Amino acid sequence: MKLVEFKENSDERGSLVSLEGNNNIPFEIKRVYYIYGVNEKSPRGFHAHKELKQVIIALSGSVTLTIDDGQKKESVVLDSPNKGILIDTICWREMHDFTQDCVLLVLASGIYDRDDYINDYVEFKNIVKI
Ligand code: TYD
């Protein structure tokens, strides 16, 4: 996982962050989705993707992201709209400890494809071993 910091265009009116595919987002953006109205006690994720890359941004509130690339497992608290986490292909992700006000923006390099998911952790570990 990689932390990406976005340039804030801030003045007395507030702040603006611009996201551009193949620029500060290191892939062409094919899909955008957002997660909100979360239950603090309900973690999400628990899968990896074969081809998909994603950038996750907490537009409001915070969440703990845990990313496992098969070699190491890292956790980071995502709590600022000017920071994103780049998740590369074949990384197991878990999202825990959502605050109630959390709104997560996700930018993805591909459209929704169930076949791109690896939902089984043992299968994930076997794939990264190869
Ligand atoms: P899910 O994969 O369970 O979310 P998370 O990664 O946060 O654990 O997705 C929740 C539901 O939304 C599931 O029924 C699939 C659907 N979905 C789409 O229809 N399109 C999408 O782009 C995504 C990410 C999910």
Image: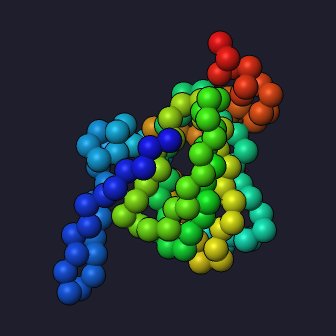
Residue 108 visible? The answer is no
Residue at the image position 50 percent from the left and 41 percent from the top: 1
Res 48 → quadrant? top right
Depth order, front residue of 33/5: 5
Residue at the image position 54 percent from the left and 31 percent from the top: 89
- Name the spot of residue 26 as percent of width and height, x first: 34, 39
Residue 48 visible? The answer is yes
What is the residue that sits farthest to the top in this orientation? 130
Asked whether, in this view, residue 3 is left or right of residue 111, the answer is: left
What is the residue that sits farthest to the left in this orientation? 11
Image color mode: rainbow
**Residue 38 against residue 129 in the figure, above or below:** below
**Residue 93 against residue 37 in the figure, above or below:** above
- Name the spot of residue 115 as percent of width and height, x first: 68, 29
Asked whether, in this view, residue 11 is left or right of residue 89, the answer is: left
Res 129 → quadrant? top right
Residue at the image position 74 percent from the left and 71 percent from the top: 39
- Name the spot of residue 54 as percent of width and height, x first: 49, 43
For the image, the number of numbered tags is 0
**Residue 69 against residue 130 in the figure, above or below:** below
Depth order, front residue of 64/49: 64
- Name the spot of residue 47 as percent of width and height, x first: 70, 40
Residue at the image position 77 percent from the left and 63 percent from the top: 42
Image quarter in which the C terminus is found: top right
Res 102 → quadrant? bottom right
